[in-house]
Amino acid sequence: MEQTRLDDRDIAILATLSREGRISKTELAARVNLSPTPCWERMKRLEQAGLIRGYRAELDLDGIGAHVQVFVTVELDSHRAENFQLFERTVAPLDAVTGCWAIGGGYDYLMQVVIQDVAAFQELMDNLLESRAGVRRYYSYIVTKPIKSVPPALGLLNG
Amino acid sequence: MEQTRLDDRDIAILATLSREGRISKTELAARVNLSPTPCWERMKRLEQAGLIRGYRAELDLDGIGAHVQVFVTVELDSHRAENFQLFERTVAPLDAVTGCWAIGGGYDYLMQVVIQDVAAFQELMDNLLESRAGVRRYYSYIVTKPIKSVPPALGLLNG
DNA sequence: CTTGAAACAAAAGAGAA
DNA sequence: TTCTCTTTTGTTTCAAG
């Protein structure tokens, strides 16, 4: 299930698609100096290998509707495998939770929440505490200003 | 520069594109119960209004190359406007910094870093301290396991 | 990897509800 | 206006070399 080695052209295709996800295959081929067919075959291979998880429009939430964005660090009651699983299974289906990561360094999880307003956020967290998902305590950090959000630079990775 | 009111179809278009960014316009039109032309016009309008910032392929970094992902909370020396600007201008061009948010709640910024390995991360942070960008201290949280990452649910927003 | 052809989608216009 | 329908142009996909 691991990767068949990626060459520079594969990396170029991935890098291009991560910035211009709706580029036409003809144009993509031109960008990576390939004719359309082999480029299309590579793209299909990358998708089927699961290296491309999907394509997403990136939206300007500020223009679309009122909302707050909050990061939350979470500490669990107990550190047994079943507690982690319980928390993860509780949190994963919540629509307002747009990101969640298990982290090292003093907390157990970092969550990213995008939701209507602060009241709705408080209700979400109250429900999470009451749900017995094993949350000992949490700290909230409201986003006051988004500074940057970009796809990872593939050039920095050990290709 | 603000939005011309979005109706349910606009929201449906945005929601669909945020999950299937490479869907064909014909298929998109079918999904939102519209014929291709008006759907195409709406989509163009949404893009030109800046509500769609761009399209991105979401990549499986684990399959592509070795890397670490780190969240970093940052506290600045001083809270004058020029200090914030200096920090933001220093951090914004760094390729390894894939996300940065100004936050309330005890720290000034949260940064998301995706980089080759822990050594490269340390070097990045050392450089940031030496650069006199006004960082008083920072805390690092290495991601040990990504749990969830999805686009925001538009249904939860005050459309 | 290239060519080339058939199937399909995108873009733009003319006009009806 | 806002949608439907039609046409032209360009893209996607695949077979064959």
Image (cartoon, coloured by chain):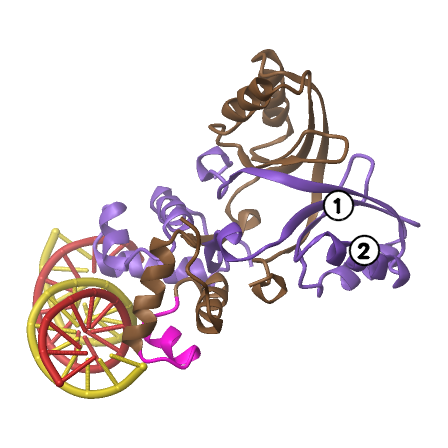
Chain colours: A brown, B purple, C yellow, D red
On screen, residue B76 above or below B129: above
Residue drawn at the location 60% of the way across and 61% of the way down: A157
Secondary structure category for the residue under label 2: helix
Q: Position of residue A35 (x, y in %)?
A: 32, 80
Q: Quadrant of residue C11?
A: bottom left
* C-alpha gap between disc 2 and disc 1: 10 Å
Q: Residue at x 60, y 11 (%)?
A: A130
List x then y, in percent, for residue A55: 41, 54
Q: Answer left or right for A62 relative to B135.
A: left
Give the label on residue B132, or none: none
Q: Would residue A108 be seen by someone viewing this image from the given angle?
A: yes
| Place of residue A92 in the rendered image (x, y in percent of width and height, measured from the top left) | 50, 29
Task: Tell me the magenta residue range.
Answer: A23-35
Would you say the residues marked 2 and 1 are in contact, meaning their CB atoms lie under 8 Å apart?
A: yes
Number of residues whose C-alpha sits closer than 10 Å to that of mark 1, classed few (under 14), some (14–19) or many (20 or more): some
Residue occupying image coordinates x 50% and y 28%: A94
- Count of numbered circles in the view: 2
Graded by Cα atoms within 10 Å as few (under 14), some (14 to 19) or many (20 or more), the crowding at tag 2 reads some
Dividing the picture into quadrants, the one containing residue B65 is: bottom right
Amino acid carrying label 2: it is: Met
- For image coordinates 30% across by 76% down, the residue present is A36
In the picture, measured across the screen, residue B28 lies left or right of residue A62, that is left
Q: Position of residue B142 (x, y in %)?
A: 70, 42
Question: Chain under label 1?
Answer: B
**Where B25 sits versus D16, above or below?**
above
Looking at the rendering, which quadrant does residue C1 occupy?
bottom left
Q: At label 1, which amino acid type do we have?
A: Val
Decide which of A23, A86 is in the foreground and name it.
A86
Q: Which residue is mark 2?
A: B125
* Mark seen at residue B72: 1
**First reached walking from the N terminus: tag 2 or tag 1:** 1
Q: Chain of mark 2?
A: B
